[in-house]
Image (tube, rainbow, N blue to C red):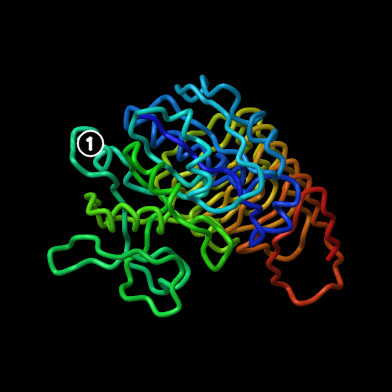
Amino acid sequence: MKGIILSGGHGTRLRPLTHTGPKQLIPIANKPVIEYAIEDLRDAGITEIGIILGTNMPNKIKDALGDGSKLGVNLTYIMQGEPKGLAHAAATAKDFVGKESFVMYLGDNILKSGIEEFVSEFDESDFSARILLQPVEDPRQFGVAELNDNDEVINLVEKPEHPKSNLALVGIYLFKNNIFDAISKIKPSWRGELEITDAIQQLIDEDLNVDSFVVEGWWKDTGKPEDVLDANQLILETLTTKIDGIIEENVKIKGKVQIGKNTIVKSGSVIKGPAIIGQNCEIKGYVGPYTSIGDETKLIESEIDSSIVIGNSIIRSDKRITESLLGQNSKILSDENTYPKGRSFVIGENSVIKL
């Protein structure tokens, strides 16, 4: 079995961060989100993985992941070009997949449980596809599955205006080789895209077997800033304490905290976990729960919580920063006379904010 990970798309809901790189490289707990997908595939025994590249700086994906050897996999890069739908992306991997079955994993999704139990025995089964589902509050934002009384998949619709169920398709799919024939028979949807839901529906219409699993535990599609912060919180809750940096006297550390090499936590600082701080940082102030601070960052007499600082940034603020997503090379510099005291940010790389 092979794996393909989709890393195209323009990430419009995460702008301005995605003006300077693909959304799949935004870090969750200081690790690019796409690496969680790679690790899930690897842990399920899938080491031959194709990365489907789009037009938004695909070389940054290549530079970040290389040949995959550091993650214990072998990566092949496949150009999709302009994104024309998930089914179109899958079709670009036809030569890579060959005659094997495969897992298609959307590169901005994170699944707590991993995928081992879903992959198990799929090769030997008579199913042409396997989909993962989870109940959601607003299914209109997702592909939606309708099941009959025997829990058999009977209908799939992409982002329906009037959903017939609340079961959203998780962005992970298992397919046999005949999905490519199904894709060749479908037409673009009203969105102008080849929808993977239509391709799976084609299998159902041809009386081929499609089964489903309702996923337990959390699943996150990190397509919006609030989803990125939520995923960061969920990952940090699984953190184990590891301190490799330098901790000066009179520092208070509570909860599960990771601190990278060559990072200095200055006297008088308070770190409350779960939190992760990267390498070569200088911390003087308060780092609160659910915060991830990337490498080469300086926090100077400042407070931050429930936020992600991607790295190479300087924060000097007399106002607490909360629920914020800060891009590379960001600077937040205080003006003592600025009010109110609470601010939230989503700012891109190389930004400067003066408060």
Q: Position of residue 208 (x, y in %)?
A: 23, 50
**Residue at point 56%, 56% (across, down):** 288
Q: Which residue is mark 1?
A: 120
Q: Position of residue 93 (x, y in %)?
A: 49, 35
Q: Number of callouts in the render?
A: 1
Indicate the amino acid at tag 1. Answer: Ser
Q: Which residue is the extreme one toward the front?
A: 185
Quadrant location, the N terminus: top left
Q: Nearer the viewer, residue 266 or 105?
A: 105
Q: Nearer the viewer, residue 82 or 305?
A: 82
Q: Position of residue 342 (x, y in %)?
A: 69, 71
| Residue 326 found in image quarter | bottom right
Q: Secondary structure at mark 1?
A: loop
Q: Position of residue 48 (x, y in %)?
A: 43, 25
Quadrant location, the C terminus: bottom right
Q: Is residue 348 left or right of residue 165?
A: right
Q: Is residue 40 left or right of residue 203?
A: right
Q: Is residue 270 left or right of residue 130?
A: right
Q: Nearer the viewer, residue 64 or 181?
A: 181
**Residue at point 55%, 58% (across, down):** 193
**Residue at point 52%, 21% (across, down):** 70
